[in-house]
Amino acid sequence: MTLIRVFIAFIFFTSIGGNTVFGQQKLSLNTNELSIVTQENLKKITDAKIQKFEQLRNKKIVSLSIVIIIILCFLFYFFYQNNKLKQKIKRKDTKQKILLNIINAGIDSNEIERKKIASFLHDNINSLLSSVGLHLNTFTAQNNIKSEEIQKAKAILQEAHDLLRDISHDLIPALLVRFGLIFALEDLCEKNSNSSINFEFSSKIPTDKRYTEKFEMKVYFIVSELFSNIIKHSCAKKASILLEEKENKFSIIINDDGKGFKTEKLNDSEGFGLNQIRARIKKYKGSLSIVSKANEGTLIKIKIPLPH
């Protein structure tokens, strides 16, 4: 009986041990399979992430490329337009320089002709008329002739002499040649003043100050042209001119109490006279500024480097 119980117990323990070993083997097998599946899943997830990252990177590269292309197109367009504008400005400046050179050439030629004609009238024609008058006076005095015709002839000769003198002085004012710019401009103010308008003269420069002949002639004709414009167009009752030397520049300030005008429309309505003034000033590397308002008069400032 005892042996039977021992044998049953042995069989029982043997069966339990075998099941345990088998279970352990089975568990080990399941763990290995799970590890393989997990690695495959991780590999798939990693591959998916890498693929997604590459797709995102490619999209960023494409987007960045498009942005760079757009920026380059804008830059190219900007440089093209800028270059086009520079060429346009350059052509405009060249055209303006050519126009100014033509105007200045005309002005210089006109002033040279003025001087030649004035000298010819004063030195030749007036001298001949004076000589004729002198001979006629000598002849009538020697022969005691008191003919009315001869008296009329003398009067005509004197009138012709005075007219030619006035013409020569208008071409090149004698005061400008003899006494200088400051004195001549003061005289110009007196000549242009009348019952309708009064020109006031003021100068911080001594009256006997002299400059080069060309400089004095150009400044005189600039002021003369501006005075003419004031008389013709401003309807002013009072005008003034101030002369001074400041910062090595000859400064002219002209002011009037006329009807004024809109300076924005000045470039569109400039006459040839004002273009000539601008050309004269630019030739001497000077500046011209005009400030005006409707019914508030006009202020003109001119600065020209002093001649050396």
Image (cartoon, rainbow, N blue to C red):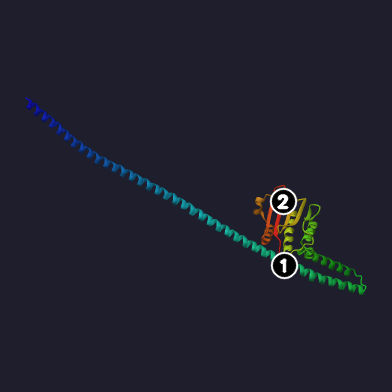
Horizontal relation, residue 68 to residue 149: left or right? left
Which residue is found at the position 17% from the left and 33% from the top? 20
Q: Is residue 145 left or right of residue 222?
A: right
Which of the two residues, 34 or 120, is positioned nearer the viewer here?
Answer: 34
The location of residue 217, given as percent across then percent down, is: 74, 63
Which quadrant of the figure contains the N terminus?
Answer: top left
Nearer to me, 298 or 14: 14
Which residue, given by chain and number where applicable, does mark 1 sit on? 113
Nearest the eye: 302 or 127: 302
Around disc 2, counting alpha carbons within 10 Å, would you say few (fewer than 14), some (14 to 19), or many (20 or more)? many
Residue 202 got which mark?
none
Return the disc, 2 or 1, that comes first in the chain's sequence: 1
Q: Say which of marks 2 and 1 sits in front.
A: 2
Residue 298: give its label.
Answer: 2
Q: Label 1's element?
A: helix
Picture quadrant of residue 181: bottom right
Q: Amino acid at mark 1?
A: Glu
